[in-house]
Amino acid sequence: MRVAEAMSRDVHVANPDQSLIEAAKMMAEGDYGVLPIGENDRLVGMITDRDIVVRALAQGKSGDTKIRDVMSEDVKYCFEEDDLDDVARNMGDLQIRRLPVVNRDKRLTGIVSLGDISTTGETEPVADALSSICEPGSQHGSTQRPH
């Protein structure tokens, strides 16, 4: 099965010049734990609810801080055509739960999560990925895939 068959296509994108308060409101309204950050029709970063807490609030930054000051810029991703089993294994190796999905033009088309994959019946790779994610040293805030 391909990523395009399991991913969530309803993705809201924030701008890096928006504030952390705006990002947090978007996350709360959509019940998201992660937001892709886009600029000039390109994916330039990702921010998680954990990033807001650990990289901003815990460091004394205000809610007016720009997303670009806190977001992860080294974005890992997968392609719509990628095999779900391969993507789940990669997510386990990277110790992450979600990946942005791009098309061959590297335009954001969705996000795939381990939850999305688990609803397809692909349980073994999801179980393996979760096992890897739960190991010490997990980089839950990281949202990226090398290409």
Image (spheres, rainbow, N blue to C red):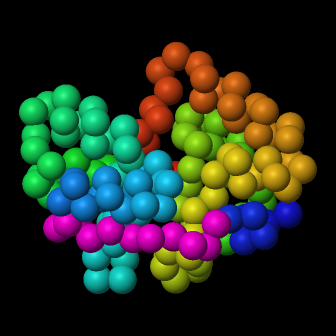
Q: Is residue 12 magenta?
A: yes
Residue at 37 percent of width and 77 percent of height: 42
Q: Most prominent secondary structure in the magenta stretch?
A: loop
Q: Position of residue 78 (x, y in %)?
A: 60, 61
Q: Is residue 51 magenta?
A: no
Which contiguous range is marked in magenta?
8-18
Residue 135: image x %, image y %?
Answer: 59, 19
Is 128 on the left or on the right of 53, as rendered?
A: right
Question: Residue 47, position in %: x, y?
Answer: 35, 52
Give the percent coordinates (x, y) of residue 72.
32, 50
State the quadrant of the N terminus.
Answer: bottom right
Farthest residue in the top direction? 136
* Residue located 75% across and 64% down the image: 6
Is 16 on the left-hand or right-hand side of 96?
left
Residue 107 in view = yes
User: Residue visible at 78% across and 33% down?
Assistant: 127
Q: Is residue 24 above or below residue 135?
A: below
Q: How many marks?
A: 0
Can residue 46 be spotted in the picture? no
Up-down: is 99 above or below 109?
A: above
Q: Most extreme residue toward the front, as rendered?
A: 29
Residue located at (22% from left, 54% from top): 20
Among the 4 quarters of the image, the one containing residue 128: top right
Residue 120 appears left or right of 145:
right
